[in-house]
Amino acid sequence: MIRIGYGEDIHSLVPGEGLRVLGIPIPFCMRPLAHSDGDFAIHAVADAILGALAMGDIGRLFPDSDPATEGLDSSLILEDVVRRMEERGFHVGNVDVLLVAERPKFSTYIEDMRGNLARMLHCDIPEVSVKAMTEEGLGPVGEGKAMRASCVVLLED
Ligand SMILES: [Zn+2]
């Protein structure tokens, strides 16, 4: 059996350090405003897997009203979601992640991101695609006020 899932996330940006994308720290003057560490790309991947399993979303599993998730390392969210996926007897067939940000340029980090995401998803690097684009100056992302990510994942049993 195969199942497909889609996930998307957006966070507004505030001045400060601490930007992490797919678990990779990236030096930048802005960071996502978030209850957790704000790794919007991990959030999109986790939501895509939960979507494929029809198990709701990370907002339901990790409510931002919960003090225990304050500043939470998002890789722990994904670890929990991957555990739920494997308990259902599924593994990742392939995953495609799109990062959308006006700055900084993610291109030099893409290979590290693929490796880290493959490690977190218990799959091989050729099964992991990470792409990046800008929004050509349009909208809140284009104006540098936010970053977003979307993800499609295929699960196989
Ligand atoms: Zn998020």
Image: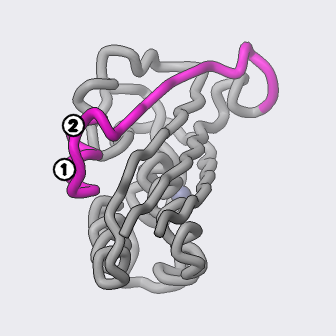
Give the vertical position of 114 relative to 41 (above or below): above
Q: Image check: 95 left or right of 26?
A: right
Q: Tell me, yes or no, whether the two marked residues, 1 and 2, touch with CB atoms within 8 Å.
A: yes
Report whether residue 77 is seen: no
Give the vertical position of 73 relative to 41 (above or below): below
Q: Residue at x 28, y 56 (%)?
A: 121
Give the vertical position of 30 relative to 76 (above or below): above
**Which residue carries the number 2 mark?**
115
Q: Position of residue 44 (x, y in %)?
A: 52, 54
Q: Position of residue 105 (x, y in %)?
A: 45, 16
Q: Residue at x 39, y 26 (%)?
A: 28
Q: Residues within 10 Å of mark 2 (few under 14, many from 20)?
A: some
Q: Image check: 116 left or right of 65?
A: left
Report whether residue 147 is seen: yes
Q: Image check: 126 left or right of 142?
A: left
Q: Quadrant of residue 150?
A: top right
Residue span colored magenta: 114-139
